[in-house]
């Protein structure tokens, strides 16, 4: 067996693929969290504007 082939017996390429998808899933969750926070911030600003315009006490 060649030296360059030795690592394939220890960690085949198929085993390294889930790490990539886990990383992508984590990035997706981070993006979703950012979008949720942005949505909530905009909704909060919209509600505050509504209360100011309509004279509703907070």
Image (tube, helix red, strand yellow):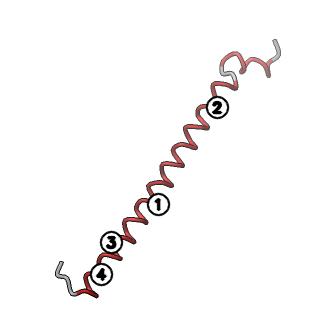
Q: Which residue is mark 2?
A: 17
The alpha-carbon separation of the residues under discs 3 and 4 comes to 10 Å
The alpha-carbon separation of the residues under discs 1 and 2 comes to 27 Å
Residue drawn 26% across and 86% down?
Answer: 52
Q: Of discs 3 and 2, which sits in the foreground? A: 3
Residue drawn 63% across and 25% down?
Answer: 15
The alpha-carbon separation of the residues under discs 3 and 2 comes to 41 Å
Vertical position of residue 5 compared to residue 33: above or below:
above
Which numbered disc flags the more N-terminal residue, 3 or 1? Answer: 1
User: Which numbered disc covers residue 52?
Assistant: none
User: Which numbered disc covers residue 35?
Assistant: 1
Which numbered disc flags the more N-terminal residue, 1 or 2? Answer: 2
Label 1 element class: helix
Residue drawn 42% across and 59% down?
Answer: 36
Q: Which residue is mark 3?
A: 44
Label 2 element class: helix
Q: Which quadrant of the rendered structure holds the N terminus?
A: top right
Q: Of discs 4 and 2, which sits in the foreground? A: 4
Residue drawn 66% across and 18% down?
Answer: 10
Vertical position of residue 44 compared to residue 27: above or below:
below
User: Which numbered disc covers residue 50?
Assistant: 4
Which quadrant of the structure image shows residue 53? Answer: bottom left
Which numbered disc flags the more N-terminal residue, 4 or 2? Answer: 2
Q: Of discs 4 and 1, which sits in the foreground? A: 4
- Residue 51 place in picture, x, y as percent: 25, 81
Crowdedness near tag 1: few (<14), some (14–19) or many (≥20) residues, C-alpha within 10 Å: few
């Amino acid at each position: 067996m060649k030296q360059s082939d030795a690592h394939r017996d220890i960690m085949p390429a198929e085993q390294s693929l889930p790490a990539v998808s886990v990383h992508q899933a984590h990035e997706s969750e981070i993006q979703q969290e950012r979008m949720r926070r942005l949505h909530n911030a905009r909704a909060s600003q919209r509600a505050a504007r509504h209360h100011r315009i309509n004279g509703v006490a907070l």
